[in-house]
Image: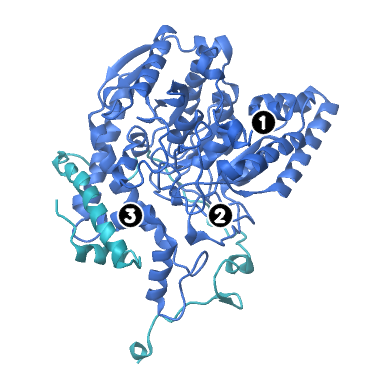
Amino acid sequence: MTAAELRRASAQQLRDAYKAGSATAVELLAALYAAIDREDAQLGAWLYLRREEAQAEALAADTRYAAARAEGPAALAALPPLLGIPVALKDLVNLINTPTTAGSRILEGYVSPYDATIATRLKAAGAILLGKTNMDEFAMGSSTEFSAYKKTVNPWARDRVPGGSSGGSAAAVAAFHAPLSIGTDTGGSIRQPASLTGLVGMKPTYGRVSRYGIVAFASSLDQVGPFARTAHDAALLLHAISGRDAHDATSSTEPLDAQLLNLPAGDAAAAGIKGRRFALPKEYFVAGMEPGVEQAVREAVRALEAAGALVEEVSLPATEHALATYYIVAPAEASANLARFDGIRYGASGHGEGNLLDGYLATRGRGFGPEVRRRIMLGTYALSAGYYDAYYVKAQKVRTLIAQDFERVWAAGFDAIVAPTSPQVAWRFGAKMADPISMYLSDACTLPANMAGLPGVSIPCGLSDGLPVGLQLIGRPWSEASLLTIAAGYEALTATAAWRSVEPHDLVALSGGAA
Amino acid sequence: MSKLTRAEVEKVAALARLGLTEAELSKLEGELNLILKQWARLAQVDTSHVAATAQTIVQPMPLRDDTPGPSLPVDEVTRNAPTHVGGLIRVQAILSEEADG
């Protein structure tokens, strides 16, 4: 394979090539780092590269493939599915002996003394960990513009945002700097950037993936999940990171569906759409939705119907309150989680001549950026004496109503909800920076699933004005394999659609003309 | 619901241990009040017979076995601290001399 083919290959294709001996992880790694060296000055997806360790991991993977090839088919089949596959990590995943900033100045200089559980699992699965990607500070934002470090551009249009908060992880996979990456999703931070960059991005069921070693934002909402360019690849990565972890009491013992490693493909996948029942919630076609987005989503729904799916409109009436509910619950939890950043044990410090309180005020006043300060203020207020019942308890009650809306859909026998992921395609830098509420509204279609703990996936479903549109599937708890099976079915149905062959427009420009 | 006054903004910033400038406080006062207007709509939702939900996916959340295991080495933990001495993290005095008396 040429360097251009290697960087574009899916994880599945890479695995097959490694097994056949037609490609090596060392060659692939050289192609990816060459692309990063050429393009990231403009793309801005990466905060830290792990070149030497990744090289050692690639060599080790190649050695294992060579030994298994010599031994025979049984030995090849026994190799772990992610062996030699590069993965990028959002920079809030602790990875031993590497910096972890969470996109914030307050963690400048911090070097992780341990591995997050998902890092341990990825290493055990033989993955190559390429480095850490840019993000909105503490995952608070929808455009990655709130990173304290750099700007990440959308490979589809350099003057537009990649979405957020996992914008670096999305841009890296969309620009073919990595076949897979890890993001986190508290209100849409995987699904929304996946939508804006034309990727598959999944937020698993709350509890599916351990959060041990992940910098916390809102602990009743945060989940870790995969970005990939295909449903099969997303399933592969999700499989490797999922499962019970003694270090995270909220991680579930719910067994993983073996189907994740065996999703149908081609005609079999397309045929699986027949007879599925989908709910189309009218509240998700919100005011302010771009006509091109609505058109692409409705066309995708028609394609599912044409393949034999039954689609019915439903109402989820509490959806209109989801935004306000989320922006009480998430900041309240964040204000508590971020209390740990005190400038004493790690990170940037403002402690000096004054007393302890002066040190806290200086550390936190300087260390946190504008959006994080806003949310800490909102959360502290919502939890403060006299306002706790009116805001926080009230929001928790409305949260119950949001969850009950979804429960009615599952009780009516639907397989999944189909909806837009984002009301808009990628917007221009700065368009929402002056108005926090307009930024918050960009998560209107994704945050209800977080409020209810449900799994959701965004899959590409077309282009509007040349920019990617995402279709969101939301399922009942623990239905990740079913959602990704549907996603694989939709991919098969639209395999020959013209928009599928379009690559991000600004790839060539990012490389100075040499992609 | 109520509008946040400047004094309340200052009080919340102090509770959150955020040392902010006058200009930063003024900007936050305006932004927070815009956001509170959005929150106010929740007061109209009838939740008189609804239980509060803290976490929607109910899990058994078993505790791990209470058995000793290795912890991080002291020097690896303290190397991230801005000031540390002999395996201890150095902090400013919590009590003043007058209070000690």
Chain-order first, disc 2 or disc 1 = 1
Q: Residue at x 62, y 32 (%)?
A: A179
Nearest the viewer among A254 and A184 is A184
Q: Position of residue A150 (x, y in %)?
A: 51, 50
Contact (Cβ within 8 Å) of mark 3 with mark 2: no
Are tags 2 and 1 found on a single chain? yes
Q: Nearer the viewer, mark 2 or mark 1?
A: 1
Q: Confirm whether residue A213 shows in the render.
A: yes
Rendered location of residue A222, percent (x, y): 43, 44
Q: Kindly report the distance in space between the C-alpha atoms of the residues bearing marks 3 and 2.
A: 22 Å
Residue A237 seen: no
Indicate the chain coloured cyan by its letter.
Answer: B
Question: Crowding at label 3, few (<14), some or many (≥20) Cα neighbours within 10 Å?
Answer: many
SS of the residue at dot 3? helix
Give the image quarter of residue B87. bottom right
Occupied quadrant, residue A427: top left
The N terminus of chain A - image quarter: top right
Mark 1 or mark 3, which has the lower sequence index?
A: 1
Report, in whole angstroms, how far the alpha carbon at label 2 lies from the one at label 1: 26 Å
Label 3 lies in what chain? Answer: A
Residue marked by disc 2: A100
Are the residues tagged 2 and 1 within 8 Å (C-beta)? no
The residue that disc 1 covers is: A7
Q: Residue at x 53, y 60 (%)?
A: A108
As helix, strand or loop, the secondary structure at mark 1 comes to helix
C-alpha separation, residue under disc 1 versus residue under disc 3: 40 Å
In the picture, one chain is blue; tell me its letter. Answer: A
Q: Residue furthest bottom?
A: B101
Describe residue A304's horizontal placement relative to residue A125 as left or right: left
Question: Which amino acid type is marked by label 1?
Answer: Arg
In this picture, residue A260 sits left or right of residue A282: right
| Residue on which disc 3 sits | A374
